[in-house]
Image (cartoon, grey):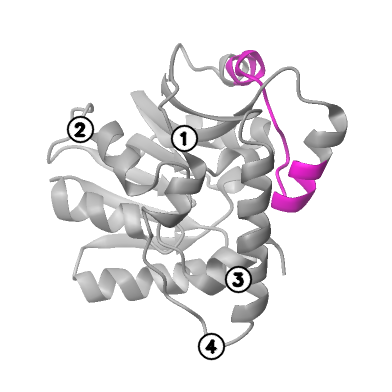
Amino acid sequence: MNYLDSLAKLGIGGAHPGGLKLTKKILVKESIDRTTSLLDIGCGTGQTAAFIAEHFPCAVTAMDIHPLMVEKAIQRFNTCNVPITVFQENVEHMRLKEQFDIVLSESVLAFTNLSKSLSSIMEALQPHGRLLAVEIMIDASMSEVDRNVIASFYGFRELLTEAEWREKLIQAGFKQIDLEQPVIDPLKVEIDEAQDFHFSESQIDEAIEILHQHQELTEIYQEALQYCVFRCLR
């Protein structure tokens, strides 16, 4: 079982840094109305997508690569009675042509081949659409050994500095890239923000052990690991 499998088994509602509290702060700054179409990539169990559908008058679509996440997202949407289209897909291969005003990514892109995923997102966005992304960012002083430890545990495909993120986004074709670094206590996010859980029936002990390892790594590397919010215009 890997880190993403453990999140799926535990059914964690908001595993991204800052949780739903940060999501709310990001969204209230956006102009969202009945004409807005929003895609939540890597939606997990659907906490964010459900919140958006309940509080914003826009069309919401959600997707995730993990079948168990999609299953639990569908259960949530049915329970909440929210009209959300949800499907299983790899963000690198979405093939959605200019369908969305907003693509929301919460701790997703670092797990992907960025060249492919950013290209796919650009294709999915309508002209003048925007990508809102909460992503991990590392300090340039982090050693290669530490990078490998973190990447190996989480399954990150790429760990980037701010300059490297900006370069990737520019290469993908985004015209305006704004970055904000919210103040986040990663340990507080895990405990006090207490995301909702939807446990599976098997392998819970193993999943909880992986979550404990995640908390230990977060504490060890809290000075070198940063989190940022990107707002990128097509």
* Residue corresponding to mark 4: 201
Mark before the other along the chain sequence, 3 or 1:
1
Tell me where residue 144 appears, x and y as whole percent: 85, 29
Amino acid under disc 1: Val
Identified by mark 3, the residue type is Ile
Q: Quadrant of residue 230?
A: top left
Q: Nearer the viewer, residue 6 or 225?
A: 225
For the residue carrying disc 3, how many other residues have a C-alpha within 10 Å: few (<14), some (14-19), or many (20+)? some
The picture places residue 107, in percent across and down from the top left corner, at: 52, 43
Residue farthest to the bottom?
201
**Disc assigned to residue 134:** 1
What residue do we see at 24% from left, 54% from top? 51
Marks 3 and 4 sit apart, C-alpha to C-alpha, by: 13 Å
Mark 4: secondary structure: loop
| Residue assigned mark 2 | 28
Give x and y (percent) for residue 17: 47, 42
Which quadrant is home to the C terminus?
top left
The residue at which mark 3 appears reads as: 208
Of the image marks 3 and 4, the number of the one nearer the N terminus: 4
